[in-house]
Image: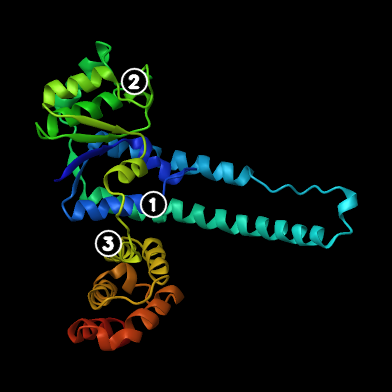
C-alpha cells in the first residue's frame, strides 16, 4: 500500500551539514517513489525555504570545516620518537588535503553540482508539488494570527506548509511527517507530535499522522530490508547528464559518471545520446574530462551501443 509522506525543509538541509543521515536514504526514497510505494508531497513553500537556506547551510558547514584542526603541538620530549615524525607528516598531509577539499566543495556548491544537489533535484522532480494558492495563504495567515501552531518568529512558513498538506492531500489516507522542527513537537514529550495538530489532522482528514524526526528512522521502521546499489546512483547521474544546462555542471556530472564502470546497454545508449544531444557537453567535447569519458565509456563500448545512436554520436564528435 502506498505511503504518503511529507519531509520538512530542515530535514532536506541536513544533507548539506554535519549529520548522521546518509544520501543513500534519499536514493531509497527516489526508488520507492518511482515504484509507486511512496508519494512525497512537496509544498511550494518547503521548496522555496530549501533554496533560500541552502547556501546558508553550506556556508556554515564550510566555516566549521575550515576552523577544525588536528592538534599540532607536541612536547619536546616526544620529538626524538619515530611516531612523532609520522604524526607530523600526517598532520601536514591532512591540512593540504583539507585545503583541496574545501576548494572543490566551494566550486561545486557555487555551481549547484554537489552530489546532494544532484540527488535532491532528482527527488524534487518526482515529488508531488503543492502550489501555494490564495486559499492556502489566507488560511495560514489566519492560523498564525489566532495563535494556532505551527509557527514562530513572525513567519507564516510552517503554517503555509501545514495548510498545504491539509488542503491538498487525500482524505482518509494516512501521512508520515518527517521533521526536526520544534513547532511540530509535543510540549510534554519531544518524541511525540504536537497534540493540537494531531487532533486537527485526525478530524479534518479522517486519517492518522505518524511522526518521525529523521528519514533514516522512518526507513528502519517501514523499509528495513531495502538496499540501494550503485545502479541507483548511476541512473540519477545519467539523468543529470541529460539535463546538464551549463559547462561546469556538465563537467561535474561527467566526472561523477567516470567513477563507475560496467554500464548496462540501456545506460550506454542513454549516455551516448546525452553526449550527442546536449550542446553543453558537445561544445566542450575536447575538454580532457569530456574526452576521457568519451574514450572510456562510449568509444570503449562501441560494440554494445545501438548502431544508430553511436553513428549520431560519431558524426557530432569525430567527423
Residue 23 — which label? 1
Of circles 3 and 1, the one toward us is: 1
Q: Which residue is mark 2?
A: 186
Lower sequence index among marks 3 and 1: 1
Query: Which circle's residue, 2 or 1, is located before the other in the chain?
Result: 1
State the image quarter where residue 298 is shown.
Answer: bottom left
Residue 55 at x, y = what percent? 44, 42
- Residue 26 can be seen, yes or no: yes
Q: Position of residue 174 (x, y in %)?
A: 16, 34
Count of numbered badges drawn on the protein: 3
Q: Please name whichever residue, 158 or 137, is drawn nearer the observer in this view of the structure.
A: 158
Q: Nearer the viewer, mark 3 or mark 2?
A: 2
Residue neighbourhood size for the residue with mark 3, other residues' Cα within 10 Å, grouped as few (<14), some (14–19), many (≥20):
some
**Element assignment for label 3:** helix
Residue 35, horizontal then vertical, whole percent? 18, 55
Q: In the rendered image of this protein, does residue 30 appear above or below residue 189? A: below
Tag nearer the camera, 2 or 1? 2
What separation in Å lies between label 3 and label 2 (alpha carbons)?
43 Å
Amino acid at each position: 500500500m502506498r505511503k504518503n509522506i511529507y519531509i520538512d525543509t530542515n530535514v532536506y538541509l541536513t544533507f548539506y551539514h554535519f549529520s548522521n543521515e546518509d544520501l543513500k536514504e534519499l536514493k531509497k526514497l527516489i526508488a520507492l517513489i518511482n515504484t509507486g510505494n511512496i508519494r512525497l508531497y512537496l509544498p511550494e513553500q518547503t521548496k522555496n525555504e530549501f533554496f533560500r537556506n541552502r547556501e546558508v547551510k553550506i556556508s556554515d558547514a564550510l566555516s566549521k570545516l575550515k576552523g577544525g584542526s588536528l592538534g599540532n603541538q607536541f612536547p619536546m620530549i616526544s620529538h626524538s620518537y619515530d611516531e612523532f615524525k609520522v604524526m607530523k607528516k600526517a598532520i601536514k598531509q591532512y591540512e593540504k588535503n583539507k585545503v583541496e577539499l574545501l576548494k572543490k566543495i566551494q566550486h561545486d556548491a557555487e555551481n549547484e553540482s554537489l552530489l546532494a544537489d544532484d540527488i535532491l533535484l532528482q527527488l524534487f522532480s518526482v515529488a508531488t508539488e503543492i502550489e501555494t494558492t490564495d486559499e492556502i495563504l489566507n488560511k495560514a495567515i489566519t492560523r498564525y494570527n489566532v495563535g494556532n501552531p505551527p509557527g514562530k518568529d513572525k513567519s507564516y512558513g510552517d503554517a503555509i506548509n501545514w495548510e498545504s498538506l491539509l488542503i491538498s492531500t487525500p482524505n482518509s489516507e494516512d501521512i508520515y511527517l518527517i521533521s526536526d522542527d520544534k513547532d511540530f513537537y509535543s510540549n510534554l514529550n519531544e518524541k511525540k507530535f504536537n497534540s493540537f495538530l494531531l487532533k486537527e489532522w485526525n478530524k479534518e482528514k479522517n486519517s492518522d499522522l505518524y511522526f518521525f524526526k529523521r528519514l533514516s528512522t522512518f526507513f528502519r521502521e517501514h523499509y528495513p530490508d531495502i538496499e540501494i546499489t550503485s545502479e541507483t546512483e548511476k541512473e540519477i547521474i545519467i539523468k543529470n547528464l541529460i539535463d546538464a544546462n551549463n559547462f561546469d555542471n556538465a563537467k561535474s556530472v561527467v566526472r561523477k559518471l567516470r567513477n563507475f564502470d560496467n554500464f548496462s546497454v540501456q545506460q550506454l545508449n542513454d549516455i551516448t545520446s546525452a553526449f550527442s544531444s546536449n550542446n553543453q557537453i558537445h561544445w566542450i567535447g575536447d575538454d580532457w574530462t569530456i574526452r576521457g569519458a568519451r574514450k572510456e565509456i562510449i568509444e570503449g563500448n562501441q560494440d554494445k551501443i545501438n548502431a544508430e545512436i553511436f553513428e549520431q554520436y560519431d558524426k557530432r564528435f569525430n567527423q
